[in-house]
Amino acid sequence: MSAKKILVLNGPNLNLLGKREPAVYGRQTLEDICALITARAKERGLQCDFYQSNSEGALIDKIHTVLDGYDGCVFNAGAYTHYSYALRDAIASVEKPFIEVHMSNVHKREEFRRHSVLSPVCAGVIAGFGADSYLLALDALQGILDKQERQI
Ligand code: DQA
């Protein structure tokens, strides 16, 4: 059986992790976090690709590649989470499981962060565990993919 392929997608301002609001997001860089995810994926027999963009259109184009290129996606859409109907439609179009990820506990912060337009088209949401949010999302996605396989 070939390794499941997962896209780990990061949206705006997440390239600045490590420098950006460290009290909220910690000191690890996106590169550090990708290395942790790669190690976890290796343990789990998954293959991960990584992509980050600050632009909505580039994220949409990358989401479209999930249709034929990936089994699922771990996605931190940053602030687009709260208002991008275009990203929401892109996720709904590809019909593969997406896990919405946030490093911070968005429910503990400003009011506008409490609403996600992406959650209704994602398989689930993980928020509030810092870099571990991505690792938990990877585990959750693997659980979904394993279940799908047992049903085939
Ligand atoms: C975030 C939360 C968003 O509200 C914010 O705009 C981000 C990061 C998180 O990972 O906690 O850019 O998605």
Image (cartoon, rainbow, N blue to C red):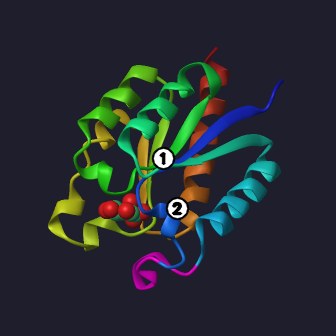
Q: Label 1 neighbourhood size at 10 Å, few (<14), some (14-19), many (20+)? A: many
What residue range appears in magenta? 20-27
Q: Which one is closest to the eye, mark 2 or mark 1? A: 1
Q: How many marks?
A: 2
Question: Residue flagged by tag 2: what amino acid is it?
Answer: Ser
Q: Name the residue under label 2.
A: 133
User: Residue at the location (40% across, 56% down)?
Assistant: 12
Task: Please say whether residue 148 is one of the residues in the magenta stretch.
Answer: no
For numbered disc 2, what is the local secondary structure?
A: helix
The response on whether ligand 1 sits within 8 Å of label 2 is: yes
Task: Please say whether residue 21 is one of the residues in the magenta stretch.
Answer: yes
Which disc is residue 60 wearing?
none
Please tell me which residue lies in front, 9 or 100. 9
| Image quarter of the N terminus | top right
For numbered disc 1, what is the local secondary structure?
A: strand
Which disc is residue 75 wearing?
1
Question: Residue flagged by tag 1: what amino acid is it?
Answer: Phe
Percent across and percent down for residue 82 are 25, 51
| Image quarter of the C terminus | top right
